[in-house]
Image: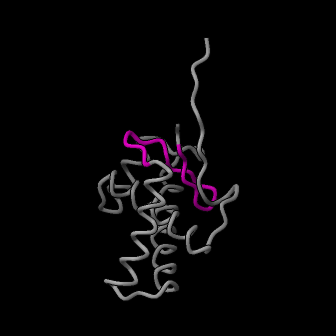
Amino acid sequence: MATLYFYKGTPFGQWEKQLSYEMAMAGGKAQIETGLRISKMSLEEQAAFYFQQLDCMEAAFCRHSRNGEITRKAIVRVAKELDMSIDKLYATWCIDICSLLIMKKIKDDNMNGIMQMSMSKTR
């Protein structure tokens, strides 16, 4: 099962270490709880922070994409530009989207959210 995570129509999901829907949603819930209990950030403050992170990543993906396609080379360039490991970039993207979905700050639609696809071999 392949899972794509979308923000403003930009997908990120083609990475070696796929984060399943269940794991990403659990990460989103944990991130919200940590924000409330440990960081003492309100839901509004957290949402603003997640939007800011996603906007920054999405803009970088757009700058480095090739004709709208986010290639492996683009992912490497974005991670370097944002001074993040690729795994951290991917996890932050996925979990921030899930956190915003849980908080109902974005809708799971054609532009934002999660798409799961099953892959089957053809003969």
Question: Magenta segment: does it hold 49?
Answer: no
Q: Residue at x 51, y 81 (%)?
A: 48
Q: Residue at x 35, y 59 (%)?
A: 81
Left or right position of 104 against 30: right
Along the line of sight, the residue nearer the viewer: 78 or 54? 54
Whether 101 is drawn above or below 16: the answer is below
- Name which quarter of the figure residue 79 lies in: bottom left
Q: Residue 7: x, y in percent?
A: 58, 60
Left or right position of 37 against 42: left
Q: Residue at x 33, y 57 (%)?
A: 88
Q: Residue 42: x, y in percent?
A: 46, 88
Number of numbered discs present?
A: 0
Q: Residue 4: x, y in percent?
A: 55, 47
Q: Quadrant of the C terminus?
A: top right
Along the line of sight, the residue nearer the viewer: 85 or 39? 39
Whether 13 is drawn above or below 95: the answer is above
- Figure colour scheme: one colour
Q: Residue 119: x, y in percent?
A: 57, 30
Q: Residue at x 46, y 62 (%)?
A: 57
> Residue lying furthest right in this view?
110
Along the line of sight, the residue nearer the viewer: 14 or 62? 14
Whether 96 is drawn above or below 94: the answer is below
- Looking at the rendering, the stretch of residues picked out in magenta corresponds to 3-19
Question: Magenta segment: does it hold 18?
Answer: yes
